[in-house]
Amino acid sequence: MQADDRLAAIHSRIAHAAKLARRDATDITLIAVSKTHPADAIEPLLAAGHRDFGENRVQEAGEKWPALRERYPDARLHLIGQLQSNKANEAVAMADAIHAVDRPSLIAALAKAMDAQGRRPACFIQVNIGEEPQKGGCAIIDLPPLLAAARTADLPVTGLMCLPPNGVDAAPYFALLAKIAREEGVAGLSMGMSDDFETAVMIGATHVRIGSALFGERASKGASA
């Protein structure tokens, strides 16, 4: 299947899930997770008209995207992986959205970089929704003070992000994140990957992060995006 056919198939599935949930499919951003994939695998999706892409690592994004953006200057880059505070300057310089804000030290580093550069990428606060010690994200109980710190620092908090536990029904975790977002007055929900994005859309996702369904299996190990 060609890149444009895979893209159309995913959009069709998003539209169907949105219709079932009585939502407008245009309110849902499809992030093509291009981490570990080379520029020549990304360009066919760009040529097909797609513009939102997700990368895990600042260094990898910096190697691929400057040349791609020369040809597609309206491409939007989402950093979706754990971000070290010492990479905040680079992240702010290249990203249009940062999906894994999860601690006060990172908030401080991002605020300083944004003030210095005059750029303010959208920020999602990552929540460790399954309380898994091996995963990033703030604890649910720590979210209110973290959100307050982000707002005080004038970070543009767009929404919340989560990665549910592997191998279980993701729906309760998506529903919990949506409930927390409503309680905290946050509109965006970055949740749902290749195996569960339709469920996420039906529960309220505004951003879904899809990798393997668009690009095939990644070269590195780990859960599929």
Image (tube, grey):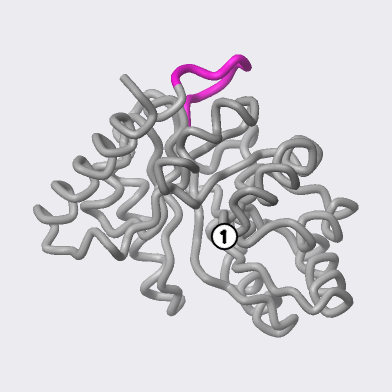
Q: Would you identify the image quadrant in which residue 120 lies?
A: bottom right
144 and 51: which is toward the camera: 51
Residue 79 belongs to the span the image colors magenta: no
Residue 217 belongs to the span the image colors magenta: yes
The residue under label 1 is 74
Left or right position of 30 against 56: left
Q: How many marks?
A: 1
Q: Quadrant of the N terminus?
A: top left
Is the stretch drawn in magenta largely helix, strand or loop?
loop
35 and 5: which is toward the camera: 5
Q: Would you identify the image quadrant in which residue 103 lies?
A: bottom right
| Callout 1: SS | loop
Residue 28, compared with residue 214, is above or below; it is below
Residue 217 image offset from top left, x and y in percent: 48, 17
Q: Would you identify the image quadrant in which residue 151 lies?
A: bottom right
Residue 98 image offset from top left, x and y in percent: 64, 57
Q: Which residues are magenta?
A: 216-225
Mark 1: few/some/many CA within 10 Å (<14, 14-19, 20+): few
Residue 44, compared with residue 140, is above or below; it is above
Residue 117 image offset from top left, x and y in percent: 84, 74
Q: Residue type at mark 1?
A: Asp
Residue at the location (44% across, 25% down)?
Answer: 212
69 and 215: which is toward the camera: 69
Residue at the location (20% across, 42% down)?
Answer: 12
169 and 24: which is toward the camera: 24
Left or right position of 158 against 55: left
Residue at the location (20% across, 64% down)?
Answer: 24
Residue at the location (50% across, 61% down)?
Answer: 160
